Amino acid sequence: MELNVRQKKIIEIVKENQPITGEDIAKKLGLTRATLRPDLSVLTMSKILDARPRVGYFYVGTKTNEGLLKFLKESPVKDVGSLPIVIAEGKSVYEAIVTLFLEDVGTIYVVKDSYLSGVISRKDLLKTSIGNKDLNTIPVEMVMTRLSHIVYVNEDDSIYEAISKILTYEIDSLPIVTAHDVNKLEVVGRFTKTNISRLLMEFANGN
Ligand code: ADP
């Protein structure tokens, strides 16, 4: 939201004099209370100012929002991601399920010669498990989402970009990779919805 010049002045006045009444803000600006009313409404409705009856206006701030956006756009995703849980091609679906439980994750990345080759999620494993197939005999590469379809982030991409991808593609996690070549993606981390929740909580608590 773009603020007009008068709204910015009001914010400065409130920051320096809070709590301050609408009357007093008007006086400082040499305007009437009525003239200021629309600006004060905009600022309170957008939660930049808080109005308390009989006390006056307080500055709540765009600061928090701006700070969060700046942080999300300027911090690399590798700084906030988790360790990746990987399984090698050739391992069985049964082993993938065991890994999922042991590591307490929802998604496993499949690697071949140390490079990313697939993604296996809970649903992929559930789908394969329906029926009486012997899960020990089915290799993970038969059920995984393959490299050409994998959505990933490079380690220096921003957190903002990673969150956008998770939302756009409706997936739970993204591999964080170091790209050695087009098809040679080394998995160095994972970015998940839990990471996003944690970030928000830390921000809310001012950590
Ligand atoms: P769940 O299986 O718990 O719903 P997801 O929504 O993440 O988890 O997975 C849904 C489908 O998307 C699965 O088939 C999975 O293989 C695939 N998938 C998961 N993560 C990715 C990713 N980063 N890139 C491409 N496909 C993915």
Image (cartoon, grey):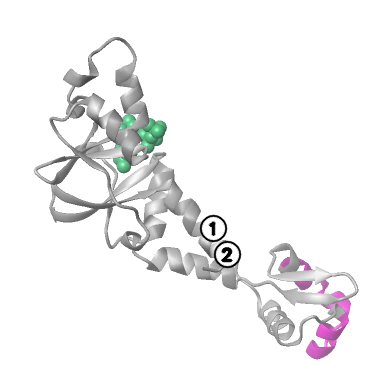
Q: As displayed, is residue 155 above or below residue 109?
A: below
In which image quadrant can residue 27 be found? bottom right
In which image quadrant can residue 169 be found? top left
Q: Is residue 75 left or right of residue 112?
A: right
Q: As displayed, is residue 168 above or below residue 136?
A: below
Location of mark 2 (residue): 205
What is the x, y in percent for residue 202? 52, 62
Graded by Cα atoms within 10 Å as few (under 14), some (14 to 19) or many (20 or more), the crowding at tag 2 reads few
The answer to whether residue 109 of the structure is visible from this angle is: yes
Circle 2 sits in a helix, a strand or a loop, which is it?
Answer: loop
Quadrant in which ligand 1 is drawn: top left
Instruction: Name, please, the residue furthest toward the front.
Output: 102
Q: Is residue 26 left or right of residue 95?
A: right
Q: Which SS does the magenta portion mostly show? A: helix
Circle 1 sits in a helix, a strand or a loop, which is it?
Answer: helix
In which image quadrant can residue 159 be found? bottom left
Per the rendering, the mark at residue 73 is none
Query: Residue at point 25% right, 12% down?
Result: 133
What is the x, y in percent for residue 25? 81, 84
Where does the magenta region start and end? 23-42
Location of mark 1 (residue): 201
Query: Residue at point 40% right, 41% down?
Result: 172
Query: Residue at point 41% right, 65% down?
Result: 73
What is the x, y in percent for residue 125? 31, 26
Q: As displayed, is residue 141 above or below residue 68?
A: above
Query: Residue at point 20% right, 20% down?
Result: 136
In the image, 63 versus 40, the foreground residue is 63
Amino acid bearing label 1: Met
Q: As displayed, is residue 138 above or below residue 20?
A: above
Does mark 1's beta carbon lie closer than 8 Å to ligand 1?
A: no
Q: Is 34 colored magenta in this rendering? A: yes
User: Rounded to the nearest whole Å, what is the CA distance between mark 1 and mark 2?
Assistant: 6 Å
